[in-house]
Amino acid sequence: MKTTVHDIPFAKPEFDEAEARAVADVLKTGWVSQGPVVARFEAMFAERVGARYAVATSSCTTALHLGLLVAGVGSGDEVICPSYSFIATSNAVLYAGATPVFADIERDTWNIDPADALRRVTARTKAIVPVHQVGLAADLDRLRDASARGIALVEDAACAIGSTYRGRPVGSHGNIACFSFHPRKTVSTGEGGMITTDDAEIAERARRLRSHGASISAHSRHESKGVVFEEYRELGFNYRLSDVHAAIGIAQMAKLDAHLARRRAVAERYDAAFARVPELQLPARPPYAAHSYQSYGVMLTSACRRDRDAVLRALVDAGISCRRGIPPIHLEPLYVERFGARSLPVTEEVASRSIFLPMYASLSEPEERRVIEAVVEIVTR
């Protein structure tokens, strides 16, 4: 008799009846656009990450765009960011009218190399975007020289809810930080994002810009119980999050600690198994950061006789969904055509040899063992 072995997904959102009830409750109110539930979600999120203010948006991409705008980035400016990131990081720079300047990454952490980033600072540099890649905080202290020179740090914290830097949550270090609630993230609302800041003026401007630049929100007009007219003094956008999405986010936040603990347990078992495999480089665990493991990535070392794509194909054939290392943005046709060819040797090496394995809170121990056994067997052939 043939036994059917189910495929193991790469990632999945962790929804149950709590999210379904939260959405149903919002639908019953009749207020489904941005309103009181968004405000509650913002307050909850700000408290969790240790920021004074949080501004919900429709995605992390729109959060990054607004984050750069409120940091003063505009036409003619340069913004330094890693190429080893999802393309939204640098696309947001283009949306703001600025030019992305790509810095290389560190071979162990896969985060922006602060020394390389600082070497690329010019008179036109307006901001640096450190990406906390797959949940490991970038080394912000080594970018302090840029801040002292008036260069804004806008953290791409898409993967970093639950991550800490120097013992404090990402989002609490005084910079603008932008988070994601995509289904692959530890907290998911389907789609959504969040800007955090300690600056009241920045938060207020971000709130206006996310809603077409209106001087007062629809919910505030409703709450005023009077005749109130909004004004539009600058070009804004429709970057709002709905109360439906926010309700899901509130339900997800209640599960955050449990999901983080499960992800870290999975990562520890992966680490323990792969530490004995010379063909694999494990995720970095620098002393200044606690990883949230939004994803778990390994890099094939020179001891591995198989190339990355062959390993990917073998894992997929074994029913294990996985992903290649993050495609470098500077090699994408859009960026080559606009800015020409350039070389980032560490980024290109890591991207060509890295693999992301299944990682989510409900990954069972039998599934973990199956992933581990398949990876070890494939890379040691």
Image (tube, helix red, strand yellow):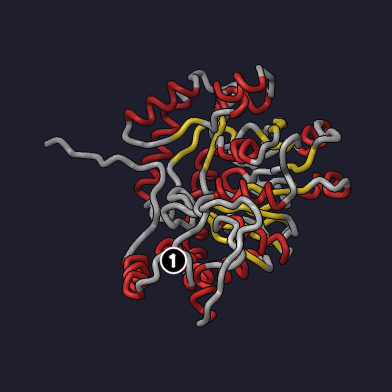
Work out which quarter of the rendered image holds the N terminus and state it: top left
Residue 223 visible in the current orientation? yes
Residue 81, position as x, y percentages in the image: 69, 37
Which residue is rendered at x = 24% and y = 40% of the image?
A: 5
On the question of residue 268 being in view, the answer is: no
Q: Which residue is mark 1?
A: 243
Could you say which quadrant of the image residue 278 lies in?
top right
Identify which residue, 330 or 71, lies in the foreground. Answer: 71
Q: Residues within 10 Å of mark 1 (few under 14, many from 20)?
A: many
Amino acid carrying label 1: it is Asp
Total labels: the figure holds: 1
Quadrant assignment for the C terminus: top left
Give the image location of residue 14, x and y in percent: 39, 57
Whole-percent x and y of residue 284? 64, 42
Q: Is residue 151 left or right of residue 214?
A: right
Residue at (48%, 59%) from the top-left corner? Answer: 241
Q: Nearer the viewer, residue 362 or 225?
A: 225
Q: Locate residue 204 relative to residue 181 in the image: left or right.
A: right
Which residue does the image show at 35% across and 67% down from the upper left? 23
Q: Is residue 87 above or below residue 54?
A: above
Q: Residue furthest left?
A: 1
Q: Position of residue 342 (x, y in %)?
A: 68, 19
Of residue 208 and residue 20, the one placed in the foreground of this image is 208
Q: Secondary structure at mark 1?
A: helix
With respect to residue 286, does 101 lie above or below? above
Residue 287 left/right relative to 178: right
Please report the residue visible at 47 percent of the width from the left and 25 percent of the height from the top: 380
